[in-house]
Image (spheres, rainbow, N blue to C red):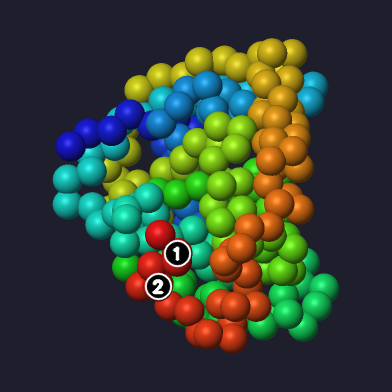
Amino acid sequence: MKKTLYHGSENVIKKPLFGIGKSYNDYGVGFYCTESMEMAKEWGVGRDRDGFANCYELDCDGLTILNLNDPKYTTLHWLAILLQNREFDVPSALALEAKEYLIRAFCPDESAFDVIIGYRADDSYFSFAQDFINGTISYRQLSNAMRLGGLGQQFVLKSKMAFDRMRFVGCEIAKADEWYARKMLRDRTARREYFDTERNRRRPGDLFITHILDEEVKSDDPRLR
């Protein structure tokens, strides 16, 4: 199976280099792509800088893929990976305990996979995750928040085998005056919808991080589905 992927950047990247990148990205060191050219254009621009949507073809045959959208995974699996890689503000003992427990109980072994598919933690979504581990919102509210603003999915190459299967197809320029505004609008829309429909709307039976810790909730708990 071949898949068309896009990578937003300020540069044209014909040959992505394995092992290059920031370790504190959402899924650690890797090459971060999307199946949406529009999303790649948003990622590629700066406030006053044009960018590119680089296009690639990936041969997925034989690759091991961690798809966090698979029904056997939950939002907490995504959050555990994020907690392990990103720099989180843990201002309380509760947040620290939550971080340690979620990594221990829900974090898959990323090294076992060539590719990871999952949410991208833009600034707004990153703040939703922080609210959850601080006990401000419930698991239901967090899961709903991840669908706000048309976040889209990341397709992250992790192994050298995956990099070797990538073929550059071409690129399109992304103009900052168009695509940076779209990026900011997406973020603002997600934040507005979050405050309008989710935050401060607790429901009876909502599962908060304190319940997850006290009950040592595991991934097979039906309340996580």
Mark 1, secondary structure of its residue: helix
Where is residue 189? Give x, y as percent. 70, 30
Q: Can you give x and y, in whole percent of width and height, for residue 120 in the image?
A: 55, 46
Q: Residue at x 28, y 33 (%)?
A: 3
Q: Secondary structure at mark 2?
A: loop
Quarter of the image with the C terminus is bottom left
Residue pushed farthest right? Answer: 91
Q: Quadrant of the N terminus?
A: top left
Q: Estimate how packed mark 1 is, as few (under 14), some (14 to 19) or many (20 or more) residues with alpha carbons within 10 Å.
A: some
Q: Residue 80 at x, y = what percent?
A: 53, 68
In the image, taking residue 168 as reference, residue 2 lies left or right, namely left
* Residue in the image at 38% along x and 68% along y: 222
Q: Nearer the viewer, residue 37 or 76?
A: 76
Q: Is residue 203 above or below residue 83?
A: above
Three-letter residue code for mark 2: Asp
Which of 191 and 63 lies nearest the eye of the viewer?
191
The reply to whether the C-beta atoms of the residues labelled 2 and 1 are less than 8 Å apart is yes
In the rendered image, which residue does mark 1 sit on?
224
Could you tell whether 104 is left or right of 221 in the image? Answer: right
Q: Which of the numbered marks, if any, corresponds to residue 121? A: none
Q: Nearer the viewer, residue 104 or 207?
A: 207
Q: Residue at x 63, y 58 (%)?
A: 203
Q: Which mark is residue 221?
A: 2
Q: Amino acid at mark 1?
A: Leu
